[in-house]
Amino acid sequence: MHSFDPGYAHTPYVGLVSDYPGAETYPPNHFRIEWGPIFHRGRLDGTARVLVLGQDPAAHESIARRILVGTAGRRFQGFLNKLGIDSSYVLVNTYLYSVYGQHGGTAHAHDPDIARYRHAWLDALVTNNSIEAVITLGGLADHAFHAWREAPTSAAYNGAYQHLLHPTYPDSAAASGADATTVMKQLTTNWNKALNVLRNTVTPDVERPFTPYGDTLTDADLGTIPEVDLPPGLPAWMRSDEPWASRQGETATEKRATISVQIPEGLRPF
Ligand code: URA
């Protein structure tokens, strides 16, 4: 038997996925709207206790149609596992579409129409679950959380809040010239601090001894995306720890239009 995400066929989610913003709200020069909106990952059955706000979907998410399934997702899944949260979570992103270009994300941090739809999701999730903690990944998500807190509808939420460095912060900081070892340690220190707070706040699915991060993320710190988080029938390698999707192309236009999917070696049944 296989488990799978049954999707959005019930209220209030059926309404949210039927009526989502497009190019009028997410300008195509700043968002890859051509890959469609990618809404969430995790429980929509009322059992979520942790609500996570990520940033924007990337290549893996565009194929799997669920958010945070690539490198950032596997790193953060490991964080949830350390909390003992193996299934009682729901994740949404700040942006419904992948940001295009360096400044697309910050340029739209205050857009009221983008916020309105995001608030509708956050309102639905806190109303239909008993959320004990909201976790944001990165600065844009932190901003989005505070914007939501200013809206009267968010008053229904009275749980904890933790803002984390984004799971791929060390990669982008190192690419901009920062020392790779230093920025990785910054991330693990930041995540250990948050875990220490959240362990006293969040009811775990599974009680397990706390193993803090060391100075860097190891393979053992990566979580595996559960089968139940993805649409039915997706092959197991789409949940593996190996990357399997990347943007390809000789020109910016070709690269924007092309995602190459390759089954990782060692995971091929042939
Ligand atoms: N993928 C997502 O869906 N969200 C992120 O924040 C990063 C990668």
Image (spheres, rainbow, N blue to C red):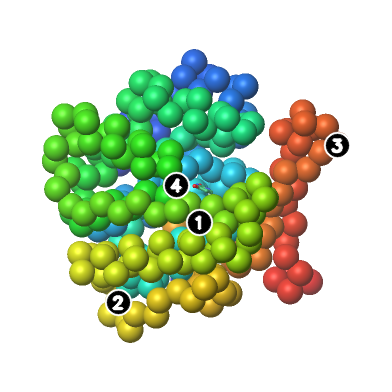
1 and 2 marks in contact (CB < 8 Å) = no
Does residue 261 appear left or right of residue 74 in this picture? Answer: right
Q: CA distance from mark 1 to mark 4?
A: 8 Å
- Disc 1 residue type? Pro
Residue 269's image quarter? bottom right
Q: CA distance from mark 4 to mark 3?
A: 31 Å
Under circle 3, the secondary element is: loop
Identify the residue shown where x is 67% and y is 60%.
Answer: 243
Q: Of discs 2 and 3, which sits in the foreground?
A: 3
* Label 2, residues with CA under 10 Å away: few <14, some 14-19, many ≥20: few
4 and 3 marks in contact (CB < 8 Å) = no
State which tag comes first along the sequence, 3 or 1.
1
Q: CA distance from mark 1 to mark 2?
A: 23 Å
Front-lying residue, 241 or 210: 210
Would you name the residue on which mark 3 appears?
A: 250
Disc 1, ligand 1: is the CB inside 8 Å? yes
Identify the residue shown where x is 56% and y is 29%.
Answer: 104
State which tag comes first along the sequence, 1 or 2.
1
Would you name the residue on which mark 2 appears?
A: 206
Does residue 8 appear left or right of residue 207 in this picture? Answer: right
State the image coordinates of residue 251 (x, y, percent, origin top left).
Answer: 83, 32
* Label 4, residues with CA under 10 Å away: few <14, some 14-19, many ≥20: some
Which mark is on residue 167?
A: 1
Residue 259's image quarter? top right
Q: Of discs 3 and 1, which sits in the foreground?
A: 1
Which mark is on residue 142?
A: none
State which tag comes first along the sequence, 1 or 4.
4
Q: Residue furthest right?
A: 250
Q: CA distance from mark 2 to mark 3?
A: 47 Å
Disc 4, ligand 1: is the CB inside 8 Å? yes
